[in-house]
Every structure is written in structure tokens, then in C-alpha cells.
Amino acid sequence: MKYRTRTAVFLLSAGLAGTSIPIMPARAQQAPVRLTLEDAIHRALEANLSVLEAQTRVEEDQGTKTRTQAALLPRVSAQTYANYQNRDLRAFGISVPGLPLPNVVGPFSNYDFRIYAQQNVLDLASYRSWKASQRAIDADKLSEQDARDMIVRVAASLYLTAQSAAARTQAAQSRVTDSVTLLKLAQDRHDAGTATGVDVLRAQVQLANDRQSLLEADNQYKQSLLELARNLGMNPGTPLELAEPLRYQSLDQPVPDVLVTAALTSRADYQSLISLRTTIIEQQRANRARFYPKVSINGNIGELGRSIGGVDTTGLIQGQIDFTIFDRDREGEAQQLAARLRRIDDQVEDLRRGVDEDIRASLLNLDSAAQQVQVAVEGQELAKRELQEAQDRFQAGTANNVEVVTAQDELARAEENYILAVSSHVDAKCALARALGDTEKNIVKFAGNP
């Protein structure tokens, strides 16, 4: 089977030997796009579907406001017609005793050119509906801001994931460098007769394992960049480069109670519920106003005549008062609005407790992560000292390289602990920024370049 396969490949190659095959020119490699955290956030906000949908809801509410406002503004229309008709006098009850009249008169024609106008002078129901539509716009604008805050949080998390993956890749590359140094040292000592072949083999195995870890870390880093590009609205094939590496930056611990009070005034989701509650209250006022009298003025003016050349100006102005005596629909609407208001009140109270919990949980995570970073730094220093001493002992010939390999593994574990601790600290700062509101500004302040 192997012989046939190779023969087939040889014959195929021979058949193509005299054929000119065009070679596609290699495309110039695209320069990577350097992304800061702030750049990533801006790109995410421009491309995310949730933000775009929230913007269209605001535009839709603005259209609703224009429609409700129309009931408070004058309505003007024009109408013109030309009639050619006859009339049945008897059908209209027109008759003169003793005087014979034809049953049908005509045909005759008339022309009418007229403008109609109507203006509501007092219409509290429409006025309250218009005010409710204004409050609905405010609520949807705040909902749009909340959607933006959520996208900012997601973009920051994806950027942090890529930063952590990049840090793991760098750590893996450093371990490969150490393993190459260890292998060279083992080979030199073996050549000098002061080390065994097992030492060389052990160093080779360690180098192979570290290279495998580097490949895995590099793949995870590239995967994180693909996901980041996708969520930023970029082509996943676009090469990216993180302008801000993973690093630890301490943050002073603020007072939780002060933060909660400030967050309730800046959290878009909380303020959106408050605006929605105001909207329902305005709708309740509009509902009660349906029983109030409505005062309007309407009229018309135009030209009326038997012929176009013989028209005369006629018009009408009248005042009108409408009273609602019985309206079962108003009672049903009032019941709906009361239930909706109770639901909003429950949501406001629940979210208030949720904001308090989010802030306190973020502060706890922030404090814990800061302590973990300190412990991880100490662990790194100890692991580096252990590795240096093991290398010195191996180079001096007082020990084999088992201690060196063990120390390298301990250092790798210490580096991973440090990356996890710093990542947790940055994530806690991002969570705190989301809990405080005004997420875009706070995340760049807490987790961006100092």
C-alpha cells in the first residue's frame, strides 16, 4: 500500500512537471491593531446590537410623544367638492297643500371649497398622556445607558481575558527559556563527566513539557483575541495587539455606605425604574382626567355656490364641551395601572438592595484579591530563590537536576497564582465600576492606564 501511494504521488508529480502553475502572490501581512481598554470599549459600543436596539426604542418613544402631543395642537384640514344631483322633496317631507309640486327636483349643481380647524382648549387627559410620554422617553434613555454599561462591562471582561492569556503566554515562554538553559547545563555537565544521561533526559522531558504548555497558552491567547475582535464588531481575522498588559494597580478602599448613596443616583437601571414609575403616575392622572370635561373650539370657512363663478363665503365657529358619563374602560385601565405601579415599586426596592449587595460584594472581592496578590508576589519571590539555589547546587555538582525541575514547577505554579490574583483584582475593579454606575468612565479609571 505504501509503495502504491508513493508511486501515484511520483506519477502525479511527473505529470505536472511540465505544467506551468501560477503562484498566487503572498498578501502583505496586515499591521496589528493596537487596542487599549478604552479603544475596545468604544468599538464595542459602536457595534453591539443591544445598544443599537435601545437607541431605536428611544426613537420610537419620541414618535409616541409627537403623536400624543398632536391632541393638544390645532388640527387643520381642507376639503373641496362639486355636486351634481337631484332631490326627492317628498322624501324630505316637503309639500304644499293645494300646490302641485314635482316629487323630484333638479338636477342642479353646487361647489364647496372649505377649510376646517379644531383646537382643544381644555383636555387634561391628553395633556397627562403627553407628560407620560415624556417620562417614557427619559426611562428608555436610561435603559439605553444601562445597556451601554452592560456592554462596557462585557468588553472589559473580554479584554481582561486576553490580558490574562497574554500573561500566561509570556510566563510559558519564560519557562521554555529556563528549560533550554537547564538542558544546556545538563549537556555541558554530561560532556564533562559530572552528570548522568538521566539528567540530560530529564531536562529534555522538561523542555518538551514546557514547549507543549507554551503552544497551549499561545493558542488560548489567539482564541481570546478572536472572541474579542468578534464582540468589538471587527473581522475575527484582524490581527490585534493589546496595548495594556496585565498589571496590578492598587485601589483605595472607599466607604460602602457612601458608595451606595452615590450609586443610586448614577445607576442607569435604578433611575430608569424611577422614571418608569413617574410615567405610570402620569398615566394614572390621565386616567382620572377621562371623567373631566373637555372643551374645544372648531369651525370652518369656505366658498359655496351653484357655480364656480358665483360662490359666496360661508363659515361656522362653535364651542363644544364633552362630558363622560359612563366609561367602564377607565376602571379597567385604572386597575391595570395600579397593579403596574405596585410591581415597579417592588422592583425599585429589590434593585436598591441589589445595588447595595453588588457594591459590598465588589469591595470584599477587591480586598481579597489585593491580599491574594501580595501572597502571590511573596510566593513568586520564594519560588525564584528556590530555583536559583537548585540551579547553583546542580551546577556545583552537589545535586542532580531533579531539584531544578521541581523548582521550575513550583515557579510555574507561583506565576499562575499571581496571574489569577491580578486578574481577580482587575475583575473586582470592573465589577465595582459596574455597581457604581457611569461604568465606562469608572472602568477606564480603575482598570485602564494610570
Image (cartoon, rainbow, N blue to C red):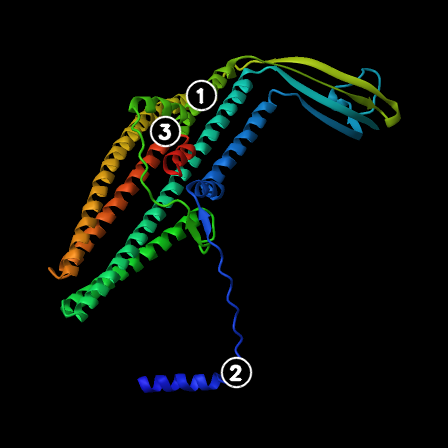
Tag 1: amino acid: Thr
Q: Within 10 angstroms of label 2, few (less than 14), some, or many (20 or more) residues?
A: few
Question: Of tags 2 and 1, which is closer to the observer?
Answer: 2
Q: Is residue 352 found left or right of 207 in the rendered image?
A: right
Tell me residue 329's x, y (percent): 47, 22
Tag 2: amino acid: Thr
Regarding mark 2 in the picture, which secondary structure is present there? loop
Disc assigned to residue 19: 2
Q: Which quadrant does the C terminus fall into?
A: top left
Gap in angstroms between the C-alphas marked 3 and 1:
23 Å
Tell me residue 269's x, y (percent): 40, 29
Write down the residue under mark 3. Answer: 436
Write down the residue under mark 1. Answer: 278
Disc assigned to residue 259: none
Q: Decide which of tag 2 and tag 3 comes sooner along the chain.
A: 2
Q: Is residue 406 visible from the viewing direction of this image?
A: no
Q: Residue at left 37%, top 87%? A: 7
Regarding mark 3 in the picture, which secondary structure is present there? helix
